[in-house]
Amino acid sequence: GAGVSQSPSNKVTEKGKDVELRCDPISGHTALYWYRQSLGQGLEFLIYFQGNSAPDKSGLPSDRFSAERTGGSVSTLTIQRTQQEDSAVYLCASSLTSGANNEQFFGPGTRLTVL
Amino acid sequence: KNEVEQSPQNLTAQEGEFITINCSYSVGISALHWLQQHPGGGIVSLFMLSSGKKKHGRLIATINIQEKHSSLHITASHPRDSAVYICATRRGAQKLVFGQGTRLTINP
């Protein structure tokens, strides 16, 4: 597939459990972004990777959230001890580089529901 | 006040009408994006611009850097244009800052 893929597409979990969300960027894209869209809210930035390093983690809402990227490709967003307010659609995007003139391509998102 | 403000929040129009969605931002930016989000949730990038005007089919995006304002226009609107349109700004090389979105409904 040529686009950004995310898995799972839907995840329902119980409060207190840990979840892992996966993003496969477009092949060759060095920059990868995680965003969140809560119900009725706009999109908000979580974290950005250039290669395997994360120069900007400013959007992570708490220390329960972490992300990693290995091999400059796949990224995993982990939420520990999930809370109901974590329920949202988590979107991943990638771009060729992190340069300002590079378009970001979005994945279909993972809808997380915390019961 | 949000860094990126869109208006209107909701817009309903009849098929064929000319549509304008506005976006104002409060800080200097390197680029502005217009995104489209359909009811299924998928986001598609429509335009990325840093000056002037871009056109793609029936869609036109303009930006005025001095006034910190951008507009998205849709000519000859169609029900399939119904979606949420999101303006997002980019400062430097990294993250996007999003407006709240404009929900557009085009009735046949």
Image (cartoon, rainbow, N blue to C red):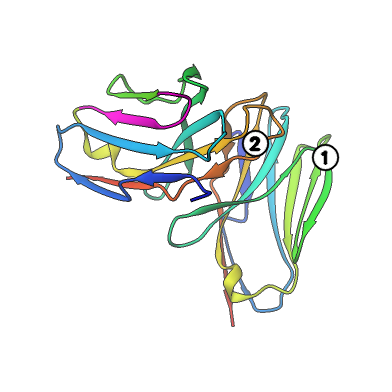
> Does any portion of residue B1 appear in the rendered image?
no
In the rendered image, residue B39, in percent from the top left (x then y), is placed at 45, 62
With A67 as the anchor, is B108 left or right in this view? right
In the rendered image, residue B10, in percent from the top left (x then y), is placed at 56, 61
Residue drawn at the location 27% of the way across and 38% of the way down: A85
Q: Which residues are magenta?
A: A70-80
Residue drawn at the location 14% of the way across and 41% of the way down: A14
- In this view, the residue in front, A91 or A22, is A22
Q: Which residue is mark 1?
A: B51
Disc 1 secondary structure class: loop
Q: How many marks?
A: 2
Mark 1 Cα shell of 10 Å, populated few (<14), some (14-19), many (≥20): some
Q: Chain of mark 1?
A: B
Q: Is residue B62 above or below residue B13?
A: above
Q: Is residue A38 above or below residue A70?
A: below
Q: Which residue is mark 2?
A: B89
Alpha carbons under labels 1 and 2: distance apart:
13 Å
Q: Residue A100: which quarter of the image?
A: top right
Tell me the amino acid under the disc marked 2. Answer: Thr
- In this view, the residue in front, B77 or B26, is B77
- The answer to whether the residue labelled 1 contacts the one labelled 2, judged by CB atoms less than 8 Å apart, is no
In the rendered image, residue B24, in percent from the top left (x then y), is placed at 69, 42
Tell me the amino acid under the disc marked 1. Answer: Ser
Residue drawn at the location 29% of the way across and 37% of the way down: A86
Disc 2 secondary structure class: strand
With A69 as the anchor, is B54 left or right in this view? right
Residue drawn at the location 50% of the way across and 24% of the way down: A49
